[in-house]
Amino acid sequence: MDVLVRPTLLINEANTRANIARMVRKAARHHLKFRPHFKTHQSRQVAQWYREEGVTCCTVSSVQMASYFAVEGWQDITIAFPLNPREADSINQLASYVHLNLLAVNAEALELFLPQLHVAASIWIEVDTGYHRTGVDPDDAASIESMLQTLGQYPKVSFEGFLSHAGHSYKARSTAAIQAIQDEEVQIMTKLKGDYQARYPGVKLSVGDTPSCSVCENFEGIDEIRPGNFVFYDLTQVAIGSCTHKQIALVMACPVVAVYPHRQEVIVHGGAVHFSRDSLVDTQGVTHFGQVVVLQGNEWLLPPQPAFVRSLSQEHGIVTGPPDWVAAVKVGDILGILPVHACLTADAMGEFLTTTNSRIAMM
Amino acid sequence: MDVLVRPTLLINEANTRANIARMVRKAARHHLKFRPHFKTHQSRQVAQWYREEGVTCCTVSSVQMASYFAVEGWQDITIAFPLNPREADSINQLASYVHLNLLAVNAEALELFLPQLHVAASIWIEVDTGYHRTGVDPDDAASIESMLQTLGQYPKVSFEGFLSHAGHSYKARSTAAIQAIQDEEVQIMTKLKGDYQARYPGVKLSVGDTPSCSVCENFEGIDEIRPGNFVFYDLTQVAIGSCTHKQIALVMACPVVAVYPHRQEVIVHGGAVHFSRDSLVDTQGVTHFGQVVVLQGNEWLLPPQPAFVRSLSQEHGIVTGPPDWVAAVKVGDILGILPVHACLTADAMGEFLTTTNSRIAMM
C-alpha cells in the first residue's frame, strides 16, 4: 500500500477474469453470441482478457470508443447508442475496416445518415421493452415498417435484427423482479422475431443488461447478449441482487487526510472527480456514494460494521462510520471504498492499478 | 454549428474574460490579494487570461494540478486541500522551484509530513467557519496551538495565516443568506487574526467562495480571496443568486438523436460522463441536470418556456420540455445545455471549444 499516494482505482484481476469466464460459460450454455459492452472498462488490456476467453466481438457506447477498440484489432463492433447522423464521417472511416453494427431508433436519423454512408454496415432496430429511454415501441408496426422501408432503399446496409436494453432492471431489488423484466423482454422480442422472420429469415435478437444476464436463465429465442457492468460489478449490482460483494472487482484506495471523532467522520482524498456522483440508499434509508472495505494484500474485506461515503465535493469525500471504527482510523491510512457505479467511477479515473502494482490504461 | 458532431463543451471567451476582469477589479477595490482557484478550468490557456489581467498567483485542489500549473510558469501556488503526507515526494519536488502554500488541518498530518520536507514551504491553517468539511474549530485553541508548536520545530516552513472556505454558502438561496455567512466568516477570521497577531505579526487571512466573493462587499481585515467557479458560473450559482444566466460562460452542445413527442422528451448524446451528475431542483420542485438554451452564433439565449435535462445515463440525456418546443426539435439538431456545476462538467469533458472553433486543452 506504500505505492498509494493519491486516489487510485484498484482492479482485482482474478475477480475480473472470473466474472468474464462465468459470463462466457453462461453464454455458451445458452448458445448465445457474447458481445460484451466495453463501456465499463474502456481498456485494451481488459479487452484482451476477454479475447483470451475466446470473445471476438464487442459493444461500445460511442463512435470514439469504437475507434479505440477498432485500432486494437476488434473487428466486429456494435455501437449501442442511437445513430447520430452528424458522425457520418467517423462512421464511414470505421466501417471501412471493421464490421460495424449501428443502432436505429427512428426513420429520421436513417434518412439523414444513409445517403452519407459509403461503405457496408449492419443496422439493428432498437426496441423499447419497458425502459422508456430510446427505441421503438414494439407495438408500433408503422414506425418499424418506416425504418425497414428506408433501410431497403440502401443496399450498403443490412438489417440485422432487433436489439433491446432492459435498463429498468436497475430498479429491481430482487431476483424475482429481475426475472419478471427478463421474461417480459424475451416475450416481446421473440414475438417480434416471429412477426418478421418470414420476411427477414436471418433476423436476430440482441438483449443484455447485467442484472438479467447475471441471474436469469431464460434466453429462449435470443441470439446475443451484451452485458457490460458484470466485468467489475459494484454496490448497485449488489443492491439489485446481481452479485455478491465478493465478486466486485474494483475498489478505490483513498488516503485519509483528517479524522473528526466527535462528528464520527473521516475525510479522504476521493471526491466527485474520482467516484463520479452516482448514489445508493442504504438499509437505513440514507444516501451514500460508496462503502468502506478493509484492504488486505490482494483482497478486500467488509468490516463488521458498515461505514459509508456520505458526501462528495470535487476532491473531498466524507466517510461516516461507527465511533470505534472512526477512533481507530489515522491520518495517512488508506481506506478501500467500493464504488456505487463501476462504469462511471472507471470513466472518471481513467486508469486502473492492479493489486500487483501494474498500471492498466483506459482510452 | 456544423463542426459539432458529438457532445462538446463550448466556452464563451468574452464572458469568461469579463468574469475574470470583474473579480480582479473587486479584489483591487478591497485591497485583497487575488488568488483564484484554478480547479474550475484546469487549463493553461484560461490561466493565461488571468495573467493578462495581472493575476500572478493561484489556488489548486491537488498536488497534480499544482504540478501542471507550475510547469506553466505559475510561481506561487496554494494547494487548498488538506496536506496528505503520502505525497511528500511530489511536494518536495514542486516546492523546490515554486512558492508552495500547503494546508494544515491537524497536527497529525504535520507530524508525518514535516520530517519529510526538504525545501521551504508555507503553511496555512484551515479554519472551519461553518461548512464542517475540514478545518480546525476556531474555538479549539488547543488544536491550533498544537499545530503551531509542531510548525515551530521545522525552520523550513513558515506559518502564513488562517484560511477558510465557506462552502455552506452553496446552500444559500438569497443575497441576504450569502451575506450572513460571509459576515460570520469575516468575524470568526478577524477574531483569530486579533488573537495571533502579536505572536505572528504578519499573520494573514484567506477566504473565498464564489457566492460570497460575487455578492458581498465586507472584506474588512481579510488579506486574500480564492474564488474559482465564478470564472464560468453555472446554474447552481444562478440558483444561489451569485450571477445571472447571462454571465454563464460554459454551455454543452449536444446532438439530438431521438424525439418522443408523446412523452414530451428529447434524447441527446450527453450523459453522466459528459455532465457529471450534480443536480438542482427547479421552481416546481423537480430535479434536473441542466437547462436548455438556444445556441445563436456566439450567444446562447433562454427559450420562452424552460426545458430541462431530467435524466442522465452514461451517454444519454433525457430532456423534457413543453409540447410545442418538443414538437419543433428534430433529430440532428444541436441543443445547448447550461451545466448545473461547471467545475465537474469541465473536469468530465477535459477540453473546451471556443465559439470561434478553437480547442482549449485542460490538464
Image (cartoon, coloured by chain):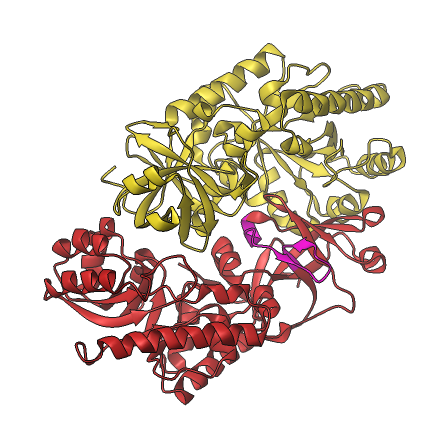
Chain colours: A yellow, B red
| Residue drawn at 39 percent across, 41 percent down | A351
Q: Is residue A283 left or right of residue B310?
A: left
- Residue A33 visible in image: yes
Which residue lies most toward the bottom here? B29
> Residue A291: where, in percent of width, then height?
44, 37
Q: Is residue B182 left or right of residue B279?
A: left
> Residue B158: where, in percent of width, then height?
17, 70
Q: Nearer the viewer, residue A179 or B231?
A: A179
Task: Choose top left, top right, bottom left or bottom right for residue A354.
Answer: top left
| Residue drawn at 23 percent across, 53 percent down | B109
Tell me if residue B134 comes above or below residue A233 in the rendering.
below
How many tags in the picture? Answer: 0
Write down the region rendered in magenta: B273-290
Q: Nearer the viewer, residue B124 or B350?
A: B124
Q: Is residue B21 magenta?
A: no
> Residue A361: where, in percent of width, then height?
39, 40
